[in-house]
Amino acid sequence: MKRALVLVTLLAAALTVAPGGASATPESGRRGYTGWLDGAEYRVEMPEHWNGSLVLYSHPYYVPGIPPGIGLANRPETENWLLDRGYALAASDFTGRYGAVYDQGPRDQLTLLDWFEANVGKPGRTIALGSSMGAALSVRLAEENPDRIDGVAALCGPLDLAASWNLSLDVTFAIRTLLAPDSDIDLVRPRDPATAAQALQTAVDEALVTPEGRARLALAGAVGNVPSWNSAFHPEPDALADRVRQMAELASVHIWGFGPTSRVDLEHRAGGNPSWNTGIDYGRQLAKSEQRELVREAYRAAGLDVGPDLARLAEAPRVAADPAAVAWMDRHGVPDGVTPAPVVTLHNTADAAVAEHERWYSGRVRRYGAPERLRQLYADRATHCAFTPAEEIVTLRVLFERIETGRWPELSPRALNAQAGRLGGEYGTVYDYPTNSYGPAAPAFTRFTPSPPLRPSS
């Protein structure tokens, strides 16, 4: 398995299992339930003394190869913290488990909620918790079932799933056009998905060794707003080559996580290709990108003019979508923003699922929902879903207080970081997927305003 695919698999695995690969173990006196409902495996854990609330967790996008196990929160330490305080936890592994389960996932969670109410008890409150793809599914679950879900905690969510796939297409389209112009690489409707993905990865690897290649790679990443910071342990790099290298690591997530190999699953579910770049002006997209200064610096270092490469992007044949597949994606992958229940989000400032999703979602809520029901939190850290258990717990506490009192608590970074710090060292570790390791991390709540979305679905 190629290194980039290993990184994608490790990321999904890190959001499922505890450090060292062991699933979280229930404490004495607790009871658990496992089984299958309509083809989906599920797991339920009950505390010794139930407080009447249920946390229903939706997992991230899974690629084949991750280890078995059903997580009940973004971090296993959070599972035990919730159980210790009387919360019941439940999660469906979703029918088929892997891929873009945008239509099936919420249905499986609702089936599990029905089972819980019939066999365990009717919760006084049900909280939808999700990470990555699961964050978007949790938002949709609440929108579609306003009488069943009392609050949503959406962590590191690519909330506009349609836009996520379009941006991944932008990145792979630019890599193919700029770094492998003579290749025959299928970006959508792939005939040989693994070969196509490997060709894109090879182009990235070869580009990293020359200034000219790094410049064009920076441009390819910038049109998708790919961050140039990809370490949960270290600050944003200063050196140009290091910034482009870390951008390349995240570009590889677009290749292996949402490129040709994953499009087979997506297109099967959607009934065709839902992604497109017809009519897109990549010069305009670059001008809006947070990485535009990196591109200027990289082209200066290489002694190149970006103009001819933008012209190549403009002249390259485009990818058209299938209308029925676009309609499927709009129906299952784009939340309305109606906020029938309180929603709190948590996002890293630098993330492969770029934080601009939060800005898009807040605009959606202002238009269609109730802005007073939405609060958005940020951690000043890089990589996808790189939160400490303390940060996840504090985020949940914020939501619990809003549900219980009808008011949001103080949300200044100082107050949130103080709460996280009081939880202690066992809740102060973070997973860094580029190194596949855990390490200590201080609470990192910060004030942050994401950039406008480059290519929102609406």
Image: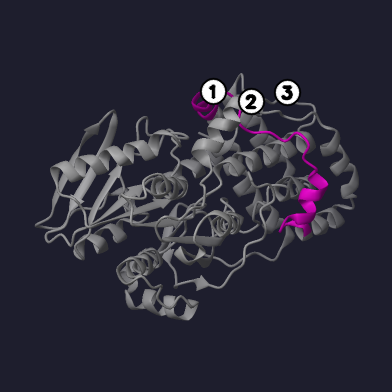
The residue range painted magenta reads 264-292
Badge 2 amino acid: Asp
Q: Pointer 2: residues within 10 angstroms few (<14), some, or many (20+)? A: some
Where residue 170 is drawn, which disc sits there? none
Q: Which quadrant of the view contains residue 257?
A: top right
Give the alpha-carbon distance from disc 3 to disc 1, as whole Å.
Answer: 24 Å
Badge 3 amino acid: Asp
Where residue 271 is drawn, which disc sits there? 1
Residue beneath the point at 41% across and 61% down: 342
Identify residue for label 3: 184
Q: Is residue 256 magenta?
A: no
Q: Pointer 1: residues within 10 angstroms few (<14), some, or many (20+)? A: some
Identify residue for label 2: 322
- Spot occupied by residue 414 in the image (x, y as percentages of width and height): 47, 80
On screen, 354 above or below 408? above
- Spot occupied by residue 47 in the image (x, y as percentages of width and height): 16, 57
On screen, 315 above or below 58? above
Q: Is residue 250 left or right of residue 130?
A: right
The answer to whether mark 3 and mark 2 are in CB contact below 8 A is no
Disc nearer the start of the sequence (3/2): 3
Q: Secondary structure at mark 3?
A: loop
Residue beneath the point at 20% across and 50% down: 45
For discs 3 and 2, the disc positioned in front in the rendered view: 2
The answer to whether mark 2 and mark 1 are in CB contact below 8 A is yes
Answer whether residue 108 is visible to the viewer in this image. Answer: yes
Q: Secondary structure at mark 1?
A: loop
Q: Which quadrant of the view contains residue 62?
A: top left
